[in-house]
């Protein structure tokens, strides 16, 4: 982590560089961090299989753009996972918890649920039985969101305070690798085998997370909220109500929530229809996988690193503003792509810039959300805030298919650019009216 002067003294001196490199390698060689990496893979694997990869499968089968856009609603469980998080945090699961422990029991149960529902989804017919396909995709998303709840808690309890920073980097890396396998990997497989087999192979990949949980001990939690002391009302007050009431004491908290909802809206609208857009421009599945998944992943990771540096250099709010403007402008490259048509080099530029800007914005946004949380309620409040941020990706972005169906691609991506403008314009106003807590760098 950068120090307060935003530089590492003597870093570029030869001796210090070697010492820093050895310390970094020693830190990341610890077993708990590799455990977190593999759990991140398990957490990231299902997301694309109910969103991007599924939308390409449906587009290939001739499903209408409007219907594909509505399938963004299957991501609703990611938005509302905070609603059942207190239950998973405090209740014992029959047989699983007794056999494997509270955290490991819930982890194995949800991972098994993801695997089974992925198998079912692969056997569905998006054209012949669209409602059944949507229902099963919703079940996958629900089990996946539940897995995220328990794995986040598992990670925090497994790592020591000194490992938490490196653990955050490893969970993100693992998550990206999981999305790579279910994104680019699934597209490669779909070019040679049927979609049903693709989803069966993805279900088997969930075994990575299950074996990781089985090979590690139950983490030792400092405290567990009792479910039997004080009654239901006391439990609801301490586990559910208190985090809400604490946040609502913040000045301008309603405006903060509105900003969280809007900041990534332009990206969300554009992302829902990206795969149908590529297919309409006659890009092959291999071209889509190579450029949007592999190259895009590298650009996104690089953007995240740059975004972290910007937060340290400029402060959270100024970094949010700069990254928000870049995110918004990057959508205009899709307008250019729509005008030019099938051009692999231009698609590389479009995806590179869009993912670089998106990664920068995500890093700044996560830093902002983290700083809003009270230390007493960090886990619960972060779940609430991140769930609200997911609304833009699900409920609001569900209209993207209708927008694309009733306009040209150039007009559609122009509208997604305008959709990002309100969130960007809110930042300078919020910097003046509702400055961040002193514990955060306001820039």
Image (tube, helix red, strand yellow):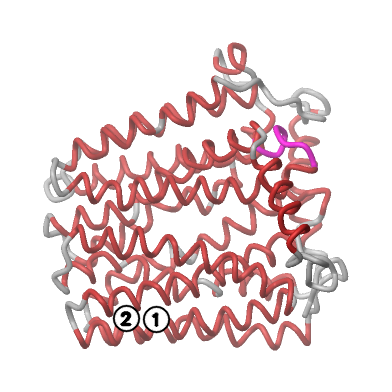
Compared with residue 339, is residue 64 higher up or lower down, i.e. above or below?
Answer: above
From the image, tell me which residue sits under label 2. Answer: 334
Q: Quick one: SS at disc 2?
A: helix
Name which residue lies at 17% across and 68% down: 283
Compared with residue 98, is residue 408 higher up or lower down, i.e. above or below?
Answer: below
Q: CA distance from mark 2 to mark 1?
A: 6 Å
In the image, which residues are magenta?
155-161
Determine crowd level at label 2: few under 14, some 14-19, many 20+ residues with C-alpha closer than 10 A.
many
**Residue 156 is a magenta residue:** yes
Q: How many marks?
A: 2
| Residue 389 image position (x, y, % from top left) | 56, 63
Is 165 or 150 nearer to us in this picture? 165
Quarter-wise, where is residue 231 in the image? top right
Name which residue lies at 43% across and 81% down: 330
| Residue 147 image position (x, y, % from top left) | 52, 37
| Residue 363 image position (x, y, % from top left) | 61, 65
Disc 2 + disc 1, Cβ < 8 Å: yes
Name which residue lies at 61% across and 69% down: 260
Is 353 or 367 nearer to us in this picture? 353
Q: Is residue 413 left or right of residue 245?
A: left
Compared with residue 237, is residue 187 higher up or lower down, i.e. above or below?
Answer: below
From the image, tell me which residue sits under label 1. Answer: 331
| Residue 177 image position (x, y, % from top left) | 44, 47
Name which residue lies at 55% across and 46% down: 81
Compared with residue 277, is residue 413 higher up or lower down, i.e. above or below?
Answer: below
Q: Is residue 224 left or right of residue 118?
A: right
């Amino acid at each position: 982590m950068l120090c307060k002067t935003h530089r590492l003294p003597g870093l570029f001196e030869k001796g210090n560089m070697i010492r820093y490199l050895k310390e970094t390698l020693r830190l990341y060689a610890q077993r708990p961090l590799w455990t977190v990496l593999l759990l991140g893979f398990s957490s990231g694997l299902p997301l694309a299989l109910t969103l991007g990869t599924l939308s390409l499968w449906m587009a290939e089968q001739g499903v209408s753009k409007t219907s594909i856009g509505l399938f963004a609603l299957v991501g609703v469980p990611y938005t509302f996972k905070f609603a059942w998080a207190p239950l998973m945090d405090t209740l014992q699961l029959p047989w699983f918890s007794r056999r494997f422990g509270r955290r490991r029991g819930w982890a194995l149960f949800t991972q098994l649920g993801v695997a089974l529902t992925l198998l079912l989804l692969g056997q569905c017919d998006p054209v012949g039985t669209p409602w059944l396909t949507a229902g099963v995709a919703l079940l996958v998303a629900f089990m996946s969101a539940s897995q995220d709840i328990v794995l986040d808690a598992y990670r925090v309890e497994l790592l020591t305070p000194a490992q938490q920073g490196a653990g955050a980097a490893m969970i993100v890396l693992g998550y990206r690798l999981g999305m790579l396998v279910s994104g680019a990997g699934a597209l490669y497989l779909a070019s040679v085998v049927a979609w049903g087999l693709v989803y069966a192979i993805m279900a088997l990949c969930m075994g990575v997370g299950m074996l990781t949980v089985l090979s590690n001990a139950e983490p030792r939690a400092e405290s567990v909220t009792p479910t039997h002391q004080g009654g239901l009302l006391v439990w609801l007050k301490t586990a559910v109500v208190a985090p809400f009431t604490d946040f609502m004491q913040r000045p301008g908290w309603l405006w903060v929530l509105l900003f969280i909802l809007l900041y990534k809206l332009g990206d969300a609208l554009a992302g829902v229809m990206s795969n149908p857009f590529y297919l309409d421009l006659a890009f092959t599945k291999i071209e889509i996988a190579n450029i949007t998944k592999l190259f895009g992943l590298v650009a996104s990771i690089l953007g995240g690193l740059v975004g972290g540096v910007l937060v340290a250099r400029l402060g959270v709010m100024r970094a949010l503003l700069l990254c928000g403007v870049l995110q918004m402008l990057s959508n205009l490259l899709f307008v250019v792509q729509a005008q030019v048509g099938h051009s692999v080099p231009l698609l590389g530029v479009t995806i590179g810039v869009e993912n670089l800007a998106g990664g920068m914005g995500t890093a700044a946004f996560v830093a902002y959300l983290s700083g809003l949380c009270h230390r007493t309620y960090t886990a619960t409040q972060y779940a609430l805030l991140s769930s609200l941020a997911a609304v833009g990706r699900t409920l609001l972005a569900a209209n993207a298919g209708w927008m694309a169906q009733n306009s040209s691609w150039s007009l559609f991506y122009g509208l997604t650019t305008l959709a990002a403008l309100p969130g960007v314009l809110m930042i300078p106003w919020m910097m003046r009216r509702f400055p961040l807590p002193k514990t955060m760098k306001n820039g």
